[in-house]
Image: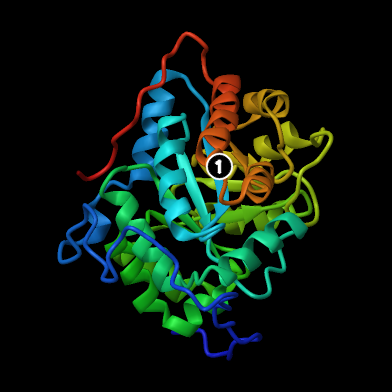
Amino acid sequence: MASRRAPPRHPVDQPNRTDGTEIPVRFPARLTLASRAIEAPMSALVSRIEQRFAELRARGEKGLVIYFGAGDPDLEATRQLAIALDRAGVDILELGVPFSDPLADALVNQLAAQRGLESGTTPKRVLEAVSAIRRESQIPLVLYIYFNLLHRVGLEQFIRDSAQAGVDGLLVLDLPPEESENYEALMAQFGLCPIYLIAPTTPEERIAVIAPRAKGFLYYVSREGVTGMQARISDTIGEMTAKIRRYSKLPVAVGFGISNPDQARQVAPHAEAIVVGSAVVDRIAKLGRSAELVPQVAAFVAALSQAIKPLSHEHTPKTVGPA
């Protein structure tokens, strides 16, 4: 279809300031080009995501994808966490863009979205934060976002702005592939990877439709329902990832419910990457604006990385993609 014509189902909330003060951040109000020449054909560029997975494959390693909510507790913390997690062994960073109605998320991530809104985090300010991160890190970066936010800004405008800021991919939670033709064309035009979800309940005939349309990697949701920490992992992960690979050669990242190094180690043989989100978000919620926020979260993430990568391999900060 030419465009998505349906109006937004829910209005986008304006950020709610609890004390009326400005949030201190260290990045400029205007977006800068972060290592991408937007005038050049973006589709000609090799994405940071693709390059990172190629490097992991060459080293015989599994990737670590970490999710947390942008602006929780504020955007300066987001910048600091992103840089620290790159150094701690994270291969791809997912930033959740705060939204008023995060239907795919359980309470831990819903509260993170609320804290992000309360700290003044808007889609525009998330992209400003990405631009600031790009001055210090080339970690592959995906925005986890709901379609209403793209619709509100304008689909082409948001994708263009994301590419200019240094975003590498979008995971749009509520955009079905059947309605994404224009979205996928714009993503290709600006060199971004459309990341798609596959669930345990996804029929094989639908996997055959979804898998070939993704770029970068496929995200396998390892259990039914919303995001959240779990006491045990699903016993059908190997079966489902094998099924997905019948229809795509893309790396498969497995997430939803992986909460600790032992679980990450159990899942790693079945996937090219492990995704951990709620367990990180929960730590951010507990530490808040504490001086220990960044070091403690980085230490937890480093333990996850060591669980799925060869212990003999000493991690060093990565710089991939366009410089």
Looking at the picture, how far across and down is residue 183, in whole percent? Answer: 44, 72
Q: Sort mark 1 into few (<14), some (14-19) or many (20+) by Cα contacts within 10 Å.
A: some
Q: Nearer the viewer, residue 59 or 138?
A: 138
Q: Is residue 157 above or below residue 290?
A: below
Kindly identify the residue that appears in the image at 15 percent across and 66 percent down: 39
Q: Secondary structure at mark 1?
A: helix
Looking at the picture, how far across and down is residue 204, in whole percent? Answer: 71, 51
Q: Does residue 230 appear anywhere in the picture?
A: yes
Residue found at the very far top of the displayed protein: 312
Q: In the visual, does 84 lie left or right of 274?
A: left
Looking at the picture, how far across and down is residue 13, in whole percent? Answer: 59, 82
Question: Residue under circle 1?
Answer: 293
- Corner quadrant of residue 115: bottom right
Q: Is residue 187 above or below residue 322?
A: below
Kindly identify the residue that appears in the image at 55 percent across and 74 percent down: 147
Is the C terminus in the top left, top right, bottom left or bottom right quadrant?
Answer: top left
Q: Is residue 34 above or below residue 7?
A: above
Number of numbered tags placed on the structure image? 1
Kindly identify the residue that appears in the image at 44 percent across and 72 percent down: 22
- Corner quadrant of residue 136: top left
What colour scheme does the image use? rainbow
- Corner quadrant of residue 306: top right
Q: In the visual, does 32 lie left or right of 120?
A: left
Amino acid carrying label 1: it is Leu
Looking at the picture, how far across and down is residue 23, in whole percent? Answer: 45, 67
Q: Does residue 1 appear anywhere in the picture?
A: no
Kindly identify the residue that appears in the image at 33 percent across and 58 percent down: 26
Q: Nearer the viewer, residue 251 or 234?
A: 234
